[in-house]
């Protein structure tokens, strides 16, 4: 499925051992297929940037050059421009987090923050704790540093803190380097950690003396339900990564991290080695975008758009998907997670789905160890509602074909029966 040609690699014995476990991003691999004109893509978590008014972006980018002059074209500080850090401070204050300028470092997207956090924390063989499933870009970033990744299962209310407690008990105090979590509108599962579990997670982390990394790209994209405070608002030791990708545009490659100062000092050293400093021009553009445009109205419009798409996907799933399917019901963000009976291998079915003109990401991409092949992530953020309905119909056809076969075997007593009630949870 990838675009790279497979060729004999005569340098294969020269690469560092740390690259052995780094897998290609399943989403990037699907990009080529997703560009076919008739293809309906549920694979990439791509924001609908066409809804960001071009005039606003041009005005911000022009003002950045006109008003910041050569500064926007020069190297800047590794921590980031003071005025963009002020934008971050204002945004975070709105979700209950009070910061000062020296609490914030601007990054090239949240992805860079995850990579640099991995760089400063992980030695080969260290244990780190994530949700299972978790963000595949984090798995890519972390696995380069050769950790032992422990995945804590989730249910419809986010990470199972009872299972986290059991794991921490087994590992003992300081037994893991960090806990990485996406508590709000999780990628890929779409679920949100309840307020009670947020408290429990933080209490456990304190009790076992383990840093928490909170990754929060989707928190402002809420469609309904009560507002949830980020973990960082409840505990100022939490390391928090944020991004402009989903509230403005990923093309700017801008995010941020906030953490206790000793950690930030190490982080800045790692950032200097990685890129000296972030793009001053991108930062100056973001400053102008958040101070001089109707960005709040744009964000509301974007959120409404995603909510309509989520609704279209949930309705189509209820109408077309087989009774054996179970799916999550996200209150915000970009993703629905679908679980099929254990014997169905959604990785091997993907090629057939692509032939039918629809793509998704098979669930094993979101686990470090090959689990999740009976699951898939469906991104509803990028297709129009009609295309979503059609894509789900196509996908249901492919799944039905496979299930017919298994049902026939099950009737003949060759395979275990398909668990019939599994779809009910997603339909309520
Ligand atoms: C959970 C999560 N973390 C981090 C990122 C990276 O975002 P950025 O574009 O800021 O690098 C993404 C992007 O989709 C994401 O879903």
Image (cartoon, rainbow, N blue to C red):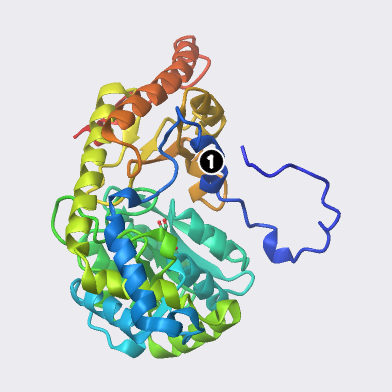
Which image quadrant is residue 423 in?
top left
Residue 13's place in the image compared with 292, above or below, is above
Instruction: Residue 315: give x, y in percent of width and height.
Output: 23, 30
The residue tagged with tag 1: helix, strand or loop?
A: helix
Farthest-out residue, front: 66
* Frontmost residue, 85 versus 142: 85
Residue positioned 33% across, 30% down in the render: 387
Q: Residue at horizontal 64%, vertical 71%?
A: 124
- In the rendered view, does 94 fall on the left or right side of 240? left
Residue at position x 47%, y 75% in the image? 279
Q: Please state which of residues 144 and 70 is positioned toward the viewer in this rendering.
A: 70
Q: Whole-percent x and y of residue 398?
A: 45, 21
Residue 250 found in image quarter: bottom left
Q: Residue 46 location in percent, x, y?
A: 39, 49
125 sits left or right of 191 in the view = right
Q: Which residue is drawn at 22% across and 82% down?
A: 98
Ligand 1, by image quadrant, is bottom left
In x, y percent, where is residue 137? 50, 57
Q: Residues within 10 Å of mark 1 (few under 14, many from 20)?
A: many
Residue located beneath label 1 in the image: 30
Q: In this view, does 346 lie above or below 301?
A: above
Can residue 142 be seen in the rendering of this structure? yes
């Amino acid at each position: 499925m990838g675009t790279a040609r497979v060729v004999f690699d005569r340098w294969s014995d020269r690469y560092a051992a740390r690259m052995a476990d780094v897998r290609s991003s399943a989403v990037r691999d699907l990009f080529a297929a997703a560009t076919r004109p008739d293809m309906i893509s549920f694979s990439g978590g791509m924001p609908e940037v066409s809804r960001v008014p071009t005039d606003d972006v041009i005005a911000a980018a022009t003002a950045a050059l006109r008003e910041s002059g050569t500064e926007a074209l020069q190297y800047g500080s590794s921590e980031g421009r003071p005025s963009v850090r002020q934008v971050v401070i204002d945004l975070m204050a709105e979700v209950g987090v009070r910061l000062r300028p020296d609490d914030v470092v601007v990054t090239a997207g949240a992805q860079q923050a995850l990579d640099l956090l991995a760089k400063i924390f992980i030695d080969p063989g260290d244990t780190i704790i994530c949700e299972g499933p978790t963000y595949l870009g984090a798995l890519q970033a972390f696995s380069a540093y050769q950790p032992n990744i422990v995945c804590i299962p989730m249910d419809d209310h986010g990470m199972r803190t009872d299972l986290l407690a059991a794991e921490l008990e087994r590992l003992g105090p300081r037994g893991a380097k960090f806990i990485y979590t996406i508590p709000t509108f999780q990628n890929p599962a779409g679920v949100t950690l309840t307020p009670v579990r947020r408290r429990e997670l933080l209490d456990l982390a304190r009790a076992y003396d383990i840093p928490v990394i909170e990754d929060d790209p989707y928190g402002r994209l809420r469609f309904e339900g009560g507002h949830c405070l980020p973990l960082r608002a409840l505990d100022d030791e939490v390391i928090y990564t944020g991004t402009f990708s989903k509230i403005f545009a990923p093309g700017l490659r801008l995010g941020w991290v906030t953490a206790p100062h000793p950690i930030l000092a190490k982080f800045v050293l790692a950032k200097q080695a990685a890129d000296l400093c972030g793009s001053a021009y991108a930062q100056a553009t973001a400053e102008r975008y958040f101070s001089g445009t109707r960005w709040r109205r744009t964000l509301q419009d974007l959120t409404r758009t995603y909510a309509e798409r989520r609704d279209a996907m949930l309705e189509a799933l209820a109408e077309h998907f087989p009774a054996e399917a179970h799916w999550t019901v996200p209150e915000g963000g970009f993703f629905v997670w679908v679980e099929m009976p254990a014997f169905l291998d959604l990785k091997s079915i993907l090629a057939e789905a692509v032939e039918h003109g629809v793509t998704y990401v098979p669930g094993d991409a979101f686990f470090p160890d090959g689990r999740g092949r009976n699951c898939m992530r469906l991104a509803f953020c990028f297709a129009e509602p009609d295309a979503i309905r059609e894509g789900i119909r196509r996908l249901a056809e492919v799944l039905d074909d496979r299930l017919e076969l298994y049902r026939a075997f099950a009737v003949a007593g060759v395979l275990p029966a398909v668990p019939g009630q599994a779809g009910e949870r997603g339909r309520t």
